Amino acid sequence: MSDKRKDYISWDEYFMGVAKLSAMRSKDPNTQVGACIVSQDNKILSMGYNGFPIGCSDDEFPWAREGDPLENKYFYTTHSELNAILNYRGGSLDGAKIYVSLFPCNECAKAIIQSGIKTIVYAEDKYENTASVIASKRMLRSAGVKMIHYEHTGRKIEIEL
């Protein structure tokens, strides 16, 4: 009998890695966010990243963060969490877990709650003092959704493509 490898990645490292890899698909020049939804038995159900809806050209819609509301990205982009929820075609997400690279805003929190996801594992919370995230946490707590800050392991994973 041989000894198994001891340096394999944990489930949390794996799923957060998938969320961060998904974020790399985002064409947003400022903020790239990824999400990975996982079943209770550690199966990946869906993934998403922030970007424009299908059919809305990345070249025709604005990426700006400021200025006229119709000329910046905020009315047009779909966040990673909502994309992951909408990309899922398998039925119910009741009891699922979502790994996100950035803590969800209030709009995504509503979608997470309504979809039945019960746990959020998040890597960063850089907007924690904004009204959007304060409202998000208030709703998530009220709905009984667990919020877990991902414990960074410092492990570097390199993939040659």
Image (cartoon, rainbow, N blue to C red):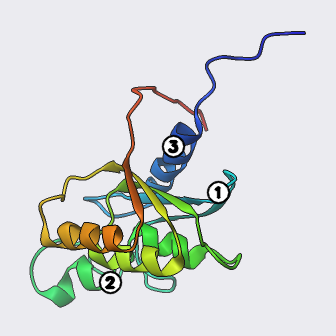
Which percent across, then down, holds residue 5?
71, 17
Categorize mark 3 by other alpha carbons within 10 Å: few (<14), some (14-19), many (20+): many
Q: Name the kind of residue labelled 2 in the image.
A: Tyr
Quarter of the image that includes the N terminus: top right
Task: Give me the residue at 36% from left, 73% from top.
Answer: 109
Which is closer to the viewer, label 3 or label 1?
1
Q: Earlier in the sequence, mark 2 or mark 3?
A: 3
Which percent across, then down, holds residue 64?
19, 72
Q: CA distance from mark 3 to mark 1?
A: 18 Å
The residue tagged 2 is: 76
Q: Earlier in the sequence, mark 1 or mark 2?
A: 1
Q: Name the kind of residue labelled 1 in the image.
A: Gln
Q: Name the kind of residue labelled 3 in the image.
A: Gly
Q: Secondary structure at mark 1?
A: loop
The residue tagged 1 is: 40
Q: Earlier in the sequence, mark 3 or mark 1?
A: 3
Categorize mark 1 by other alpha carbons within 10 Å: few (<14), some (14-19), many (20+): few
Which is closer to the viewer, label 2 or label 3?
3
Task: Give me the residue at 68% from left, 78% from top.
Answer: 89
Query: Outermost residue toward the bottom?
Result: 70
The residue tagged 3 is: 17
- Which label sits on residue 2? none
Looking at the image, residue 90 sits to the left or right of residue 48; the answer is right
Q: Secondary structure at mark 3?
A: helix
Q: Secondary structure at mark 2?
A: loop
Categorize mark 2 by other alpha carbons within 10 Å: few (<14), some (14-19), many (20+): some
Q: CA distance from mark 1 to mark 2?
A: 32 Å
Front residue of this view, candidates 14 and 140: 140
